[in-house]
Amino acid sequence: MERTLIIVKPDAVQRGLTGEIIRRFEARGLRIIGMKFMQVSDELARKHYAIHDGKPFFAGLVEYITSSPVVVMALEGTGAIAAARNTIGATRPGEATAGTIRGDFALEVGRNLVHGSDSVENGQIEVGNFFDESELISWPRNTDPWIFEGR
Ligand code: IDP
Ligand code: MG
């Protein structure tokens, strides 16, 4: 089963949208296997966004993600990567479809509320960067057979 790392970014926490954002992933059927409230360090921010190092917005991005606490979640599900990214919406909120998190609550790319892993491989790596194996719980959810066919 695929794993994705979701970050409820500082702007979302400050704006009181944490519950609304968790609700959408939960309602989608993704299974929470890890969740915590934390302050992202400069070191972790640079590691998480290493692919963007050197881009003009990198310094601002590190400043943004470390500016205030976040909520991080590890979610599991069939096709979790694509499902979560579709729930989040396009990177630039102006291009995000209404009904997505960014399309409903955001206006600017530098304040786009939420992160979701972009590939199966990165989902595994990013969950590992933010969570200790001991913080992850693989649990049988009673509704699993109603969400995952054949389980
Ligand atoms: P994603 O979050 O939709 O995967 P990425 O292209 O991976 O988008 O970019 C990572 C994050 O960097 C974005 O979510 C956004 O916060 C920030 N970002 C990307 N492009 C820009 C930009 O042009 N200006 C400011 N911030 C940007
Ligand atoms: Mg990305």
Image (tube, grey):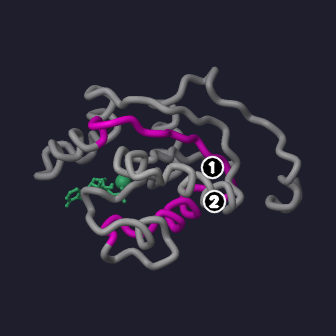
- Residue 136, x across and y down, in percent: 65, 30
In the shown orientation, is residue 41 left or right of residue 136?
left
Q: Is residue 2 magenta?
A: no
Which residue appears at 88% of the width and 56% of the height?
A: 145
User: Residue 78, located in which quarter of the rendered image?
Assistant: bottom right
- Whether 90 is among the magenta residues is yes
Residue at horizontal 30 percent and vertical 69 percent from the top: 107
Pointer 2 residue Cβ closer than 8 Å to ligand 1: no
Instruction: Check disc 1 and give the amino acid type.
Output: Glu
What is the distance, in whole Å, between disc 2 and disc 1 at their CAs? 6 Å
Q: 101 or 19, which is in the foreground? A: 19
Q: Which mark is residue 15?
A: none
Q: Marks 2 and 1: CB-CB under 8 Å? A: yes
Q: Upstream in the sequence, badge 2 or badge 1? A: 1
Count of numbered circles in the view: 2
Q: Position of residue 65 (x, y in %)?
A: 30, 41
Residue 54: image location, x then y, percent: 13, 45
| Above/below status of 47 relative to 105 | above
Ligand 1's quadrant is bottom left
For mark 1, does the 10 Å Cα neighbourhood hold few (<14), some (14 to 19), or many (20 or more) residues? some
Name the secondary structure under disc 2: loop
Identify the element where label 1 is drawn: strand
Residue for point 49% across, 70% down: 100
At 36% across and 44% down in the image, what residue appears? Answer: 10
Amino acid type, label 2: Gly
The stretch of residues the image draws in magenta is 65-93
Q: Which residue is mark 1?
A: 2
Reading the image, the residue beneath label 2 is 79
Q: Quadrant of residue 81?
A: bottom right
Neighbour tally class for label 2: few under 14, some 14-19, many 20 plus, Cα within 10 Å: some
Q: Quadrant location of residue 105?
A: bottom left
